[in-house]
Amino acid sequence: MDPYQDLSRSVAGRVVIITGAASGMGRATAHLFAREGAHVAVTDLDLAACQHVVTEITNGGPFRVQAFALNVSDGTAIPRVVADIAAAFGGIDILVNNAGILRDRMLFSMAEEEWDSVIKVHLKGTFGTSRFAAEYWRNRSKDGKTNDARIINTSSVAGLYANPGQANYGAAKAGIAAFTQIAAQELSRYGVTANAIAPGALTRLTEDLNLPDEMLAKFDPRWVAPIVTWLASPLSKDVTGQVIESNGMFLAIAESWQRGPTLTTPPAEAEDVDAAIRPLLAAARPRTTMADIN
């Protein structure tokens, strides 16, 4: 099956903001949204790179697409750019948080700047755009208007199953998964759903891994773009607070932290803890690891 096959045009006329859209998964998602008739705000650090994506898209037809420079780690810039996009397109319906960076290093070698920069772009960046989009939708709701809005965040299998050498990235992506579930609960009353994808997709972040061609094909970002578009469509209106794994090998629902084996009479004394907790550990389901999914 061609992962780029046309979906129903259920997002036609909808306004979507995509961060990190100049390359990789964001670029593929922008192309598919435009083909499905959405009005697309292509945002990234480099305005020229965003404009290149806009040109690619508009060369294929009279699509309504516009480039905006946006540094998601700059909290002062986000409200201005979100307002500019709303003014340019007449509103906002969908936010796709996709911007990201890597600063991989083992924990004992990681510099504070490497930790801070990844957290700032991924986790704070997701918060920043979501916060101002959420305010926009809440204000519409308070004015008596009906929303059918979407937040679609980008987590990662590294944030779900842990990947050595990515303490900063994994922590940020795990945070995004939790953030998504909380946002889903807070914003449902305003007609907003919030979901996340946890892709195994090749982007500029992962292009140096030297994977074989057959594996590269399975991790093409275009396997993820249709899931994002589906989450933006009316077909997923009842879906919120979910984290969905997607690549060319599988589609899966990531199950969040669940209470496992439980003792309803917990030990009150320190000397009793080991005897109490060992049976629980033995009965617990083994955790999925990155080795299990590759």
Image: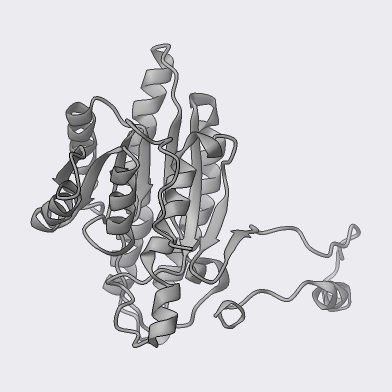
Residue 158: image location, x then y, percent: 49, 71
Residue at the top extreme, as displayed = 144
Question: In this orientation, which residue lies closer to the viewer: 274 or 237?
Answer: 237
Judging from the image, the colouring scheme is: one colour
Residue at the left extreme, as displayed = 48
Residue drawn at (45%, 74%) of the image: 218
Whether residue 259 appears in this view of the structure is yes
When the figure is inspected, residue 129 is found, relative to residue 204, above or below; the finding is above
Question: In this orientation, which residue lies closer to the viewer: 73 or 245?
Answer: 245
Residue 282: image location, x then y, percent: 83, 78
Whether residue 107 appears in this view of the structure is no
Q: Quadrant of the C terminus?
A: bottom right
When the figure is inspected, residue 110 is found, relative to residue 265, above or below; the finding is below
When the figure is inspected, residue 254 is found, relative to residue 81, above or below; the finding is below
Question: In this orientation, which residue lies closer to the viewer: 146 or 81?
Answer: 146
Left or right: 88, with 205 as reference point: left
Q: Quadrant of residue 100?
A: bottom left
Residue 234: image location, x then y, percent: 50, 34
Residue drawn at (29%, 67%) of the image: 101
Question: In this orientation, which residue lies closer to the viewer: 150 or 139?
Answer: 150
Left or right: 120, with 106 as reference point: left
Residue 240: image location, x then y, percent: 56, 41
Left or right: 115, with 231 as reference point: left
